[in-house]
Amino acid sequence: MTPRRLLPALRRTLAAPWLILGLGLAHLALAAAVATPVRAAYRAAMGPYFHEGAHRLLAPLLEITGQQRAAPASLMAAVVITAVIAALVGPLLAGAAIQRLAGPCKVADQARTAVAFYPASLLIGVYGVILRALLLLVAAALGSVHFVAQLLLTIAALTYATAVVDLTRATVVLTDARPYHPRTFLRAATTVAQDPLLWLRSSALSLVHIAVVVAIVLAALHGFGAAWSPWAVRGLGLLATGFALVRIAVAVDRVVPRPGA
Amino acid sequence: MVVTTAARRATLALALFFGACDAGPPPETTVAEPTQALRPAQLRGPVPEDAHVVDYVLDARLDAEAHTVTGTARVTWRNRSARPVSSAPLHLYMNAFRADDTVWMQEARGSHRSAHQGDDGKWGYIDLKAARLLGQAQAAGFDNLEGTRGAAVDLAWKEGDDPTLATLTLPAPVNPGEAVVLEFEFLTQLPEVFARTGYAGEFHFLGQWFPKVGVLAKDGAWQARVWTLNSEFYADFGDYEVHLDVPDNMVVGASGILVAADPPADGRKKLHYKAEMVHDFAWAADPNFREYSAMWRDVRVRQLIQPDHAADAPRHLEALIATLESMDTRFGSYPWSTITVIHPPEDAAGAAGMEYPTLFTTSDIYTIPRWVKISGLDEQLSGVFTTIHEFGHQYFQGLLASDETRQPWLDEGFNTFANTLTISDWRGEDAWIARIGNQEFTLDDFSAIDGGEADLYLDPVDAPPEAYRAVTNTYGDIVYRKTAAMMLTLRRIVGPARFDPAFKAYTTAFRFRHPTGDDLVNTLIRELGERPLIVDKGLGDQPVHLDLRGYFDHALHTVDGIDFTLDTVMNRRRAGDAGYHRDEHGVLQLADRAPEPRDTRVRDLPDEDVEAVIVVVRRGEFKVPVEIDLEFSDDTRERLTWDGQDRYRLLSYPGRRIRAARLDPDRKLLLEIRRLDNVRAAPEAARPDGVSHAVGGLGESLALVTLGGLGL
């Protein structure tokens, strides 16, 4: 695989700058909104006092955890709420994103598509979860020999399932395929298995996406409390959205090839 | 070809990154066996003759298949009290594992420090087969007693309500100064190890494996108690000659030194060990042990470690030598010529972390995968802290043999305190012990107690081990951590320069003794005074003292906590003197001054028209001096010491504007329950709290990670 093979998907994505910007900013806004109660809870826990020592925050955090359970609970709640939002909103936005990546269209059309295909998109997500679970079981069984082998198999399994979910959604949104029927999903699974380049392109972008997410974690940990950290994290968050869209564009490109591509 | 090379490189890089390379255990290292069990007198210091009370000659044969030890114990015991005794208590510790209804098991319910009783070798016991009196004589020393034999007299014994304690009836009183030679035949069945002693596969650890005589106090009262879950051991000092008969493939580590080894015959070998002036004898046997030995000065350090953890031996050795250096300097010379470290296998984790004279068991170093370390997650004490801690017990209670069955804080707590000093000596003051990302968890963080840990306030420090119930989970937090925090806090309040020599006076005076809590308090009061001076000029220009006895009363006998808070840090309008005042003739006169500008906000007033007000409140009942650091708007700072006796103290500074105040700025009060309320700014100098922004950022990051691009 060469970067040139990714160019059509990249061009599709770059052709929709407002989609990137809109989803990226929504991404950041959602994260900021979820974090606001967390800040408030810890501010309340600190009361009129302040802590000194930017690299010595573990002890006060433990003290707060021990004495004021509401604060750590707010952090846990933020993560759970975000996970629920991701599970519910992702499939909704996927329909709109696929519609826009297939070609220019109005925002209203995108919204209609998103709503119309939401149940199907959710169900395809569930199929994806089942496929991931099955593949992870296989990876666990095959990879028991060595940790590295297991890791590689796990990555392959996860990226394969992601490619299948993307392709199924793109097929459902852009063709007359039956949206709820498992055969549509299985057909996409077969297509991905038979088209290693499609799988590789999608996998490469999934891995980059995962790397960006890992980078967010690292930036958060190494920059905990530092002024640069939130901006680095937000920048990476935007990148994560961008790479997710390019990955979806790879599936869209398979269903609706660009003229001359 | 290029592709193949690249693939190989990639595979190698991955393997290295994920730690897949297994270079095998490093070659073993041995050093010569010491020839004397004790270090030379000029190095070890004197050994008090009257501390020598009991000698054991043990013959033991290990059946590694049945996990049993059959043996005899010849015990020479001398009555050093002022009263005759006609019976003696016998500890039969292994019987704790004999049945579900022993006192130990009733509290433990089949588990100990996260290890659980096995299904195969569930039970352990010691079956006393015979007891005899071999001799009784007035004897000045112990040397000739082994030969003092008359006709053996069978003795009667009776197990108590709990089988860990039996009473031996003597045919005639043993008078003060007299000695008896007793002989016991016993069979010890080892349990599958989950609490200190037992077996796991081929690994055998023999602790609490033979009958032991109780301790006779000077007043003639026997000190011997039923073995309970948290209780450890208490015994007199003496010499041990131990003859072990084991399968010839076994590598053996034992208390003391190996003085002779017979050539193997019939698949067995016989080893002769000797330990002097110790109060117990333990040993381990495992064919898989690899030996790594080294010397610290004239002391042999011998590690017996499992092959899969052999690479960790140098780190344990480094920690152990650092501990020897630190404790030898701080608490007096290490008296024995050897120390043996046993590394139990992973399936015998229940045996890990236990101390016996000149031998202890440690635990494995946790290896953080390299790819996880990218997160900045790291630690430097797992495993080696066990080594530091268990070696520390060579002093607290190996050398200062307090009664662990009555005052466990004297060994576990003091040892934890000593470990903190050792780590400071080794790694530096307030060294980090764990970190993640850019954050560090330091030795002070580890040592400080936290008010969120409610179990710290259920039981006092000075209590017998059975007072701490398994379900309340108080033993570790109070006996180990709170005691250590108590000692560290005291050390910081009076200052290491005065505290360290005073504590060394205690550790020196009570070597080879059985010190009590009163001995400690009295020694420190004698060395430091009843009310040691903390500062010449505290608040109100009065000297500030620490009530040392009160400190120990609070710390040891109550559940009171130290807790101060900055209730108020503010600036207000300075009281003016405008208005009518009588002049020297008694006539009211209006002061010829402009009225105070009452509508001006305090923050806009010039500093000379402002009064700084700070209210410090003592919320805890534990009264100790506390330092207060005041930061004024003119960039000056003042450090004050308040004796902490009143409920609160109001500080007023007319003509000055306060920016911020800090309580206990040098973190001396590691016993303080809450520290978050120790730093406060005046409202007009308010600053970010230093926590919420960071955690909010983390929350935002976690949200972005969880969303992962809006779940797309």
Image (cartoon, coloured by chain):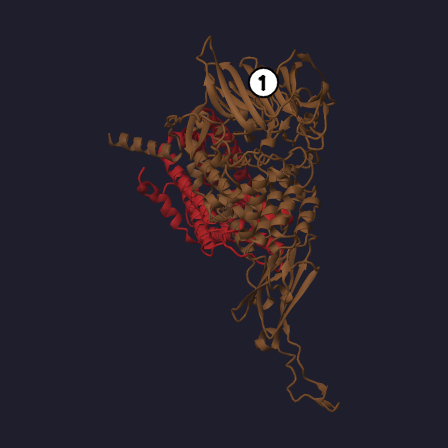
Q: In this image, B474 relative to B604: left or right?
A: right
Q: Pick out the residue farthest to the top.
A: B266
Closest to the observer, A21 or B538: B538
* Chain A, hue in figure: red
Q: Secondary structure at mark 1?
A: helix
Please tell me which residue is depicted at 66% across the width and 43% down the height of the picture: B456
Closest to the observer, A26 or B29: B29
Please tell me which residue is depicted at 63% across the width and 16% down the height of the picture: B183
Badge 1: chain ID: B
Say above or below: B171 vs B660: above
Closest to the observer, B604 or B573: B573
Q: Which residue is mark 1?
A: B146
Please tell me which residue is depicted at 60% across the width and 24% down the height of the picture: B208
* Chain B, hue in figure: brown
Task: Determine crowd level at label 1: few under 14, some 14-19, many 20+ residues with C-alpha closer than 10 A.
Answer: some
Which amino acid does the dot numbered 1 rest on? Glu
